[in-house]
Image: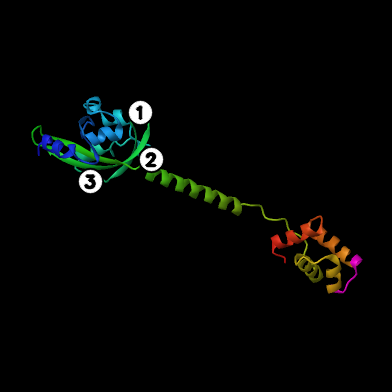
């Protein structure tokens, strides 16, 4: 297959397409690539794709160098799955693209070339990153709830004290509680004093809320 034939096919492609050598030098750049990245072909030919796009994978590493690079895989006829890449456009904007790769032999020059087809996925990445942040925040909230210090132990309440707090929790006043239990108001006050001491609270309302929080009533 001649490279010139491949270039003709790629020129009218809807996706941004560029072709690089095994040394990462750009030898073809179609019109869609000019629109996506902002660089005219004349500005990028014979430059390396890393120099032009400064691409970083989702892990923040270059995909153009090293033993796991696209070029290394292409040189060893290994399969190259589609991948996401964060690149820099001509105006300095960082943009996420998805890249598919095709490797072919240029019959005329007897060299292997790499075709990259790419399209903008920045909106999708924004959604993914927002969702990731929400998930992390939710985990932190749950973690905070799980690590709340346990309430200090308190003395056990008597059955009568349980009844008193239960009645107060039903919005009954002191007179009604005393009447329902058949005790005098001074006796009720004595019970409340004992309850506050046991629960380490300071008044009736605080005692009721504290007992509800502990699941005592």
Dot 3 or dot 2: first in sequence order is: 2
Would residue 19 be counted in the magenta stretch? no
User: CA–CA distance between discs 2 and 1?
Assistant: 24 Å
Q: Which mark is residue 79?
A: 3
Q: SS at mark 2?
A: loop
* Left or right: residue 135 compared with residue 205: left
Q: Is disc 2 surrounded by few (<14), some (14 to 19) or many (20+) residues within 10 Å?
A: few
User: Magenta residues, as a range?
Assistant: 181-186
Which numbered disc, 2 or 1, marks the residue closer to the eye?
Answer: 1
Q: Residues within 10 Å of mark 3 (few under 14, many from 20)?
A: few
Q: Is residue 100 above or below residue 51?
A: below
Mark 2 lies on residue:
59
Q: How many marks?
A: 3
At x 87%, y 74%, the residue is: 182
Along the line of sight, the residue nearer the viewer: 195 or 7: 7
Q: Along the polypeptide, which appears first: circle 1 or circle 3?
A: 3
What is the x, y in percent for residue 89? 33, 31
Reading the image, the residue beneath label 1 is 91
Secondary structure, mark 1, is loop
Query: Disc 1 versus disc 3: distance between alpha carbons?
Result: 33 Å
- Residue 53 in view here: yes
Mark 2 or mark 1: which comes first in sequence? 2
Closer to the eye: label 1 or 3: 1
| 109 is higher (above) or lower (below) than 14 | above
Q: Secondary structure at mark 3?
A: loop
């Amino acid at each position: 297959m001649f490279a010139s034939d491949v270039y003709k096919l790629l020129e009218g492609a809807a996706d941004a397409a560029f072709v690089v050598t095994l040394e990462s030098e750009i030898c073809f750049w179609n019109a869609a690539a000019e629109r996506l990245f902002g660089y005219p072909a004349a500005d990028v030919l014979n430059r390396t794709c890393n120099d032009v796009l400064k691409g970083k994978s989702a892990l923040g590493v270059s995909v153009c160098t090293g033993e796991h690079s696209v070029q290394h895989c292409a040189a060893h006829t290994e399969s190259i799955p589609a991948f996401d890449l964060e690149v820099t456009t001509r105006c300095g904007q960082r943009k996420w693209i998805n890249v598919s790769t095709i490797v072919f032999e240029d019959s005329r020059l007897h060299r292997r070339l790499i075709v990259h087809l790419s399209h903008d996925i920045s909106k999708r990445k924004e959604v993914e990153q927002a969702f990731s942040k929400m998930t992390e925040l939710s985990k932190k909230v749950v973690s905070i709830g799980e690590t709340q210090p346990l309430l200090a132990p308190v003395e056990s309440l008597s059955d009568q004290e349980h009844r008193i707090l239960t009645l107060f929790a039903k919005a009954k006043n002191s007179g009604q509680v005393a009447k329902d239990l058949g005790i005098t108001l001074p006796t009720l006050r004595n019970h409340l004093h004992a309850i506050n001491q046991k629960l380490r609270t300071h008044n009736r309302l605080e005692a009721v809320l504290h007992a509800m929080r502990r699941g005592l009533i």
